[in-house]
Image (tube, rainbow, N blue to C red):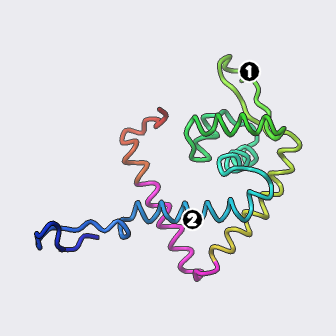
Amino acid sequence: MKKTGEINGDLSAEVFQLENFLPYRLSVAAETVARLIARNHLAEIGLTMPEWRLVAAVGRFGVLSPTAAGAYAAMDKVKVSRAAASLVGQGLLRQTQDPNDGRGRLLRLTRKGAAVYADLIPTADAIEATLMESLTKAERAVLHKALAKLSAHANAILQPNGADAEE
């Protein structure tokens, strides 16, 4: 990642190479894939990436609190709130009071939202298949395993005592 180079006339200085920095590379890959999905798939159904992720999370689990939906969709409270408000406005999501917690809310798909979710499944499969075309079966397995290990390790660093990372 670092190489010796010349900075302000000092030949022994370490040079930081952003293009080889793993967090940067992961971020660029994620952003590129997100743009591909948004341009080729989400535009036609009129959803933003956060809306799509929220529909996918609620569709998978049925009824979720905004906090749980955010955890499953890897989104912060603000993104969940904005996406939920937009989806409610589009008639895709219903937000109700949690009967077990007077202050809590629950999210569930409407019939229209369930239809959109059903359409997302083959679209998501097609996106993944297109992206994975360039990898062998063995490379795919290694990629999935490596990403799972990196995610687990990063989460362990963030939550060293098993505490909830909610801010």
Circle 2 residue: 32
**What is the x, y in percent for residue 131?**
63, 73
Q: Is residue 160 shown above or below 144?
A: above
Task: Looking at the image, tell me whether mark 2 or mark 1 is earlier in sequence order.
Answer: 2
Q: Is residue 22 shown above or below 70?
A: below
What residue occupies the far front of the structure in this picture?
8
Count of numbered tags? 2
149 magenta-colored? yes
Asked which quadrant contains residue 31, the reply is bottom right
**What is the x, y in percent for residue 34?**
61, 60
Judge from the rendering whether residue 152 lies leftward or rightward of residue 107; answer left or right.
Answer: left
Q: Do the residues bearing badges 2 and 1 touch, measured as CB atoms within 8 Å? A: no
Q: Secondary structure at mark 1?
A: loop
Magenta highlight range: 133-153
Asked which quadrant contains residue 96, the reply is top right
Amino acid at the residue labelled 1: Pro
Q: Which residue occupies the foreground of this view, 139 or 28?
A: 28
Amino acid at the residue labelled 2: Thr
Categorize mark 2 by other alpha carbons within 10 Å: few (<14), some (14-19), many (20+). few
Asked which quadrant contains residue 121, the reply is bottom right
Q: Which residue occupies the foreground of this view, 159 or 2?
A: 2
Circle 1 residue: 99
Q: Quadrant of the N terminus?
A: bottom left
Q: Which residue occupies the foreground of this view, 99 or 48?
A: 48
Categorize mark 1 by other alpha carbons within 10 Å: few (<14), some (14-19), many (20+). few
**What is the x, y in percent for residue 101?**
66, 20
Residue 130: mark: none
